[in-house]
Each structure stands twice: as structure tokens, then as C-alpha cells.
Image (cartoon, grey):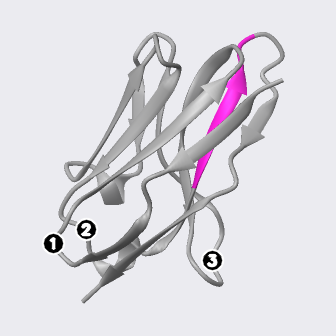
């Protein structure tokens, strides 16, 4: 069983920055972030594996950075150069290390004003 608690969303002006955090309980294989804008599907933003391998959506490469503090079992998403198209609910996502079961956080709203 994995539980995910997200924090750090909010309202920011275009060009600004935000950092999202997701604290996990349980044994994680990989963890990361997806986002869903109104009327759109949920899309990958970034993930990081136990081995530190990272994967980013092309649209956020060079602007977002995912990192992981294994001691705290927490993942961070540093988001820079935000634009209104980044507005979405951001969901923390994790896979259990043994079962590979997927788990989702409750979501945190990120709103970027122009």
C-alpha cells in the first residue's frame, strides 16, 4: 500500500516558479507527476525511478526538474518559466516496488496567470 500527499500548488504569474512536493509512504519503484487540464486527458509531466532515471514530457524539458529525497521518501517538481498552458491539476503518481501497482495523490491545482 502506498499513500501520497501532495503540496505546493497555487497561483503564479507567467514566468514565475513553483515547487511541488509529494511525500510517499510505502516502498516505491518510481514516482512522479502527471497533470490534467480542464477537458483534457491526464498527461505525464515527469517521473524518476529508484535508480535516478528521469523522464520528462517534451513540453516541460528545460523548465521543470524532478528530484527525489530517498531519506524522506519525497519527490519534488521544480517548475520554472511557467506559462498559462501549464495550468492544470497536478497529480503525484507512484508504482509500488513489488507489485507495480499504481497509486495517485489527490491532486494539487497549479494556475498560471498571463
The quadrant of the rendering that contains the N terminus is top right
Residue found 50% across the figure and 50% down from its top: 7
How many numbered marks, from 0 up? 3
Residue 51's tag is none
Relative to 50, residue 16 above or below: below
The quadrant of the rendering that contains the C terminus is bottom left
Residue tagged 3? 40
Residue 107 falls in which quadrant of the image? bottom right
Which element carries disc 2, helix, strand or loop?
Answer: loop
Q: Magenta segment, principal secondary structure?
A: strand
Residue 82's tag is 2
Circle 2 Cα neighbour tier, 10 Å, few/some/many (<14 / 14–19 / ≥20): many
Residue 95 among those drawn in magenta: yes
Residue 15's tag is 1
Q: Which residues are magenta?
A: 91-97
Asked whether the residues under the numbered discs 2 and 1 touch, taking CB atoms below 8 Å apart as contact, a structural biologist would say yes
- Label 2 or label 3, whichever comes before in sequence order: 3
What's the distance in space between the residues labelled 2 and 3, CA to CA?
Answer: 19 Å
What's the distance in space between the residues labelled 2 and 1, CA to CA?
Answer: 5 Å
- Residue 9 appears at what percent x and percent y? 44, 61
What's the distance in space between the residues labelled 3 and 1, CA to CA?
Answer: 23 Å
- Residue 5 appears at what percent x and percent y? 62, 42
Residue 95 falls in which quadrant of the image? top right
Amino acid at each position: 500500500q502506498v499513500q501520497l500527499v501532495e503540496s505546493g500548488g497555487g497561483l503564479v504569474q507567467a514566468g514565475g516558479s513553483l515547487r511541488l512536493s509529494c511525500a510517499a509512504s510505502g516502498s516505491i519503484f518510481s514516482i512522479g507527476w502527471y497533470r490534467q487540464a480542464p477537458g483534457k486527458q491526464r498527461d505525464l509531466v515527469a517521473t524518476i525511478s529508484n535508480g535516478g532515471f528521469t523522464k520528462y514530457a517534451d513540453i516541460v524539458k528545460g523548465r521543470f526538474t524532478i528530484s527525489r529525497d530517498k531519506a524522506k521518501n519525497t519527490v519534488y517538481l521544480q517548475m520554472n518559466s511557467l506559462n498559462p498552458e501549464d495550468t492544470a491539476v497536478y497529480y503525484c503518481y507512484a508504482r509500488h516496488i513489488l507489485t507495480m501497482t499504481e497509486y495517485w495523490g489527490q491532486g494539487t491545482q497549479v494556475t498560471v496567470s498571463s
